[in-house]
Image (cartoon, rainbow, N blue to C red):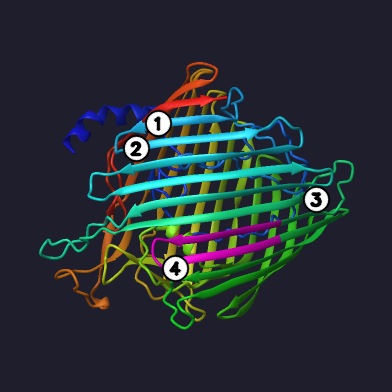
Amino acid sequence: MKLHKTRFKNYAIVALLVGFGSQGLAQENPDKPVTIDSFNVVRDYKPILADAVKIRRSPDMTNKRSYMPKLSYGNVVDKKLDINTGLKQLDVQEMPFTRIEDITSNYVKLGIGNLGTILGEAYIAVEDYEDIRFGGFVKHLNQKGSLEDQKFSRQEVGVFGRRVLPAFTVDGLIGYNRYGTRFYGIPEAVSGESLNREREAQRFNDIYFTGELTSNFDPLNEDALSYSAKVDAYTYKDKFDANENSVALSAYLNKRVRAFNIGANVAVDVNSIGGTANMVNDGKINNSLANINPYISFKGDNYAITLGANLVSEFGDSSRFNIFPSAEVDFSLVPTYIHLFGGINGGVQRASYKSFTQQNPYLAPQQDFRNVVERLSFFGGIKGNAGATFGYKAKVMYKTLEGLPLFVNNLNNPFQFDLIYDGNEDNTVKYIGLEGEINIRLSELINLGGKLNIDQYTTATEEEAWFTPKMRLAANARFNISEKLYIDAEALFHGISYAKSYDYDGPGFVPDPGSYRKESIPAFFDLSAGAEYKATKNLGVFVKANNIFNNEYQRYLYYPKLGFGMIGGLNFSF
């Protein structure tokens, strides 16, 4: 530890001068691992319904890496701010501010570092045909920390393809993800005796498939019917008895009639979870949803309005039918520069074992799973651009929630976590949130971005929204020093959060659930920086430093993160 604090102090100062960072490195993130974790206790529902008024067009096949998997080992804020006020032809060719030259699609990357880090990536795509593209990717990453059995590993492999036909486009992806870790948490009894002697291994296997058929945009007939049909399926299993199987079918239709767009989004998500606390059906829960979202939208020169409804049916072991409003308005106060927007909606967020364990892989077995009902949600804000050099967005949200999921430490095994739920139909959880985002392009060489989230929960029965920070701030900076050298930096600040904590007399001791105390999880700041140099046309070298301040902070109680880590290696493109 002393070595870290002295030798790496200079690295920290240099990295701070580089700039602020992005969606700072989430240590131990199962989706984007270098230090593998997830920061949100409660995941916002990501509906599988397509955007209500999206007009499609044939993709530009010159756009490189359209299938590039998310193999990065840092979370980078999306720098694009949506300021569209209505329908227009979409430009699907990405033109980032900071990319000076095109990058060859195919590459192999190899890297090693401290913390036992070994990284290997490969991406290959066949792009020789005008209307066909296919390829595959593979990745391996493993790390270990200073604590006993503080180990992480992730493997990814997948194949993809796309076929563009005159009327529509078909594309698909099939892949496999594996994530492994151990219950390395270090709770101790009052006597100092360890409450986690075995530090058992845990691993998750995810086989997934997604395929979509989408109509192509016809510039000669903007009033043509647009449509899309999509299937998403996965089977997900841990080392023990827990598993989840899901098949989701979704589609949308949209028809433009003069200034109006009329259409509907529909989706059916059939889901089952095994190894749960439900003893009625051999530990299985059938938890499925069906959504119908009819809408009508119209736009003028400086405004766009969408009106509709969201009809959600929950079926399976239990059933419930809900009707929610769905309305949104976007008004151009000063075209391009200032847009005011707002709306009201509601919906149901399906409980998912896969989603929960990607947030917190140390979940105890045999959990209960309940959907979150978002009874009423209001939002409004301002957004805009000042040319191509400055973009901003600020949004205020208010929600009433039933069944808010929260993580708490298990009473019998405090190094594992349970799911509890707060709020019901008679006593809902109130949420007020503020979200701000900014992107600044100082020149062709410098691009800065940042995102701020402030979340305030008024709980119904729990004292706190456990493990939920009230403030999160992420930022990034990128510097193109030359055509061969670029430097970037990423940072993340998480405010203080709280956990339920108990005193234990020793292994096997189970405390009284009512005897808990509210323990603070300190705020933390995580800074990372990296550089890449293209030595030749095909060969490059890279280096990246993570958690430069060597803060072994905790996101969840008893689970300190990895300290300072550095990785370097070669990147060969062809």
Q: Give SS at disc 1.
A: strand
Q: Label 4, on which residue?
A: 405
Three-letter residue code for mark 4:
Pro
Cα–Cα gap, marks 2 and 4: 34 Å
Q: Estimate the x, y position of residue 18 in percent, counting from the top left.
A: 40, 28
Q: Which residue is mark 3?
A: 300
Q: Which residues are magenta?
A: 230-250
Where the C terminus falls, by quadrant? top right
Residue at (44%, 25%) from the top-left corner? Answer: 570
Q: Earlier in the sequence, mark 3 or mark 1?
A: 1
- Please identify the quarter of the rendering in which residue 496 is found: bottom left
- For image coordinates 66% across by 33% down, the residue present is 126
The picture places residue 322, in percent across and down from the top left corner, at 63, 76
Q: Position of residue 539 (x, y in %)?
A: 50, 20
Q: Are marks 2 and 4 in contact (CB under 8 Å)?
A: no
Q: Residue 240 colored magenta?
A: yes
- Image: 48 above or below 567: below
